[in-house]
């Protein structure tokens, strides 16, 4: 998939968020390898509790492992870490570095995703040159305090119809409800807790991806 600027976009229907704070005592490398073995094609590294040095170290190794498996590696929030690790892209929130500034720093080849919570924000992100948007929270979530009430699948459907760039649904998405966001038009479903806390991460990913063929 390629967007109007020619930058290659992800094609995976599952957008896995790797958060070291969510994996208990397991090594993050083993969790990442399990995600990739299961078929997760896009990995976002969220590491708010790590120092800048640790973040770069994890991102650098994570990108190498993800690239070797044929996947794409996105860094959450930190443009500097994304550049240092030569990641495939960066994902920014509404309070992070402005999209226009981030684009000047990362160049035209890397992906930039923008978190949105309203239709107007989604449209603004597309007009500003985002490669994709995250939209949510769709359902209630315990992994991140967004300050927003659940948006629901109806609002997600409206956003998907209003923009032409891929929409990644996020917030409280699990194996039990992921089909709802795909049916609403989301290009991908972002998951954190349901993946990070699974006893068998690779098997969980395979089951979720298998469901996509039934939607």
Image: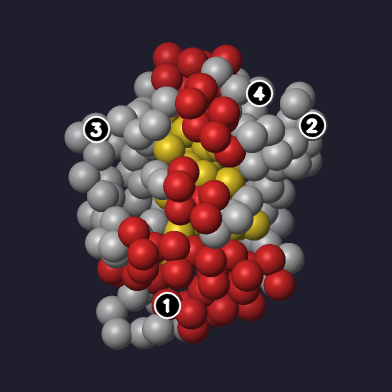
- Asked if residue 134 shows in the view, the reply is yes
Q: Does 181 sit left or right of 52 as displayed?
A: right
Do callouts 3 and 1 mark residues in contact (Cβ within 8 Å)? no
- The disc label shown at residue 6, or none: 2
Crowdedness near tag 2: few (<14), some (14–19) or many (≥20) residues, C-alpha within 10 Å: few
Q: Position of residue 59 (x, y in %)?
A: 49, 64
Would you name the residue on which mark 3 appears? 148
Would you name the residue on which mark 1 appears? 28
Crowdedness near tag 3: few (<14), some (14–19) or many (≥20) residues, C-alpha within 10 Å: few
Query: In this picture, is 10 found above or below 57?
Result: above
Query: In this picture, is 30 found above or below 63?
Result: below
Distance, label 4 to label 2, CA atoms, is 14 Å
Q: Residue at x 40, y 84 (%)?
A: 27
Q: Does 19 sit left or right of 106 as displayed?
A: left
Q: Secondary structure at mark 1?
A: helix
Q: Secondary structure at mark 3?
A: loop
Chain-order first, disc 1 or disc 4: 1
Q: Residue at x 34, y 39 (%)?
A: 137
Distance, label 1 to label 4, CA atoms, is 34 Å
Distance, label 3 to label 1, CA atoms, is 29 Å
Chain-order first, disc 4 or disc 3: 3
Distance, label 3 to label 2, CA atoms, is 33 Å
Would you name the residue on which mark 4 appears? 164
Q: Position of residue 112 (x, y in %)?
A: 56, 37
Crowdedness near tag 4: few (<14), some (14–19) or many (≥20) residues, C-alpha within 10 Å: some
Q: Position of residue 113 (x, y in %)?
A: 52, 37
Q: Nearer the viewer, residue 144 or 181?
A: 144
Distance, label 1 to label 2, CA atoms, is 33 Å
């Amino acid at each position: 998939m390629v967007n109007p600027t020619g930058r290659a976009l992800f094609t995976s229907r599952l957008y896995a968020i790797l958060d070291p704070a969510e994996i208990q005592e397991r090594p993050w490398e083993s969790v990442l390898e399990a995600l990739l073995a299961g078929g997760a094609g896009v990995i976002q590294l969220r590491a708010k509790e790590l120092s800048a040095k640790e973040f770069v170290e994890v991102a650098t190794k994570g990108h190498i492992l993800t690239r070797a498996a044929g996947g794409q590696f996105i860094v959450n929030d930190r443009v500097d870490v994304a550049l240092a690790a030569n990641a495939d892209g960066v994902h920014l929130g509404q309070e992070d570095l402005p999209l226009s500034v981030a684009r000047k720093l990362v160049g035209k080849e890397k992906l930039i995703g923008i978190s949105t919570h309203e239709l107007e924000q989604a449209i603004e992100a597309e007009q500003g040159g985002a490669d994709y948007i995250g939209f949510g929270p769709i359902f209630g979530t315990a992994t991140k305090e967004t300050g927003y009430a659940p948006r629901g699948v109806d609002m997600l459907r409206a956003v998907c119809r209003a923009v032409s760039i891929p929409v990644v649904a996020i917030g409280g998405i699990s194996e039990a409800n992921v089909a709802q966001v795909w049916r609403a038009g989301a290009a991908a479903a972002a998951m954190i807790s349901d993946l990070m806390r699974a006893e068998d991460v690779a098997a969980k990913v395979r089951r979720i991806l298998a469901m996509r063929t039934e939607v």
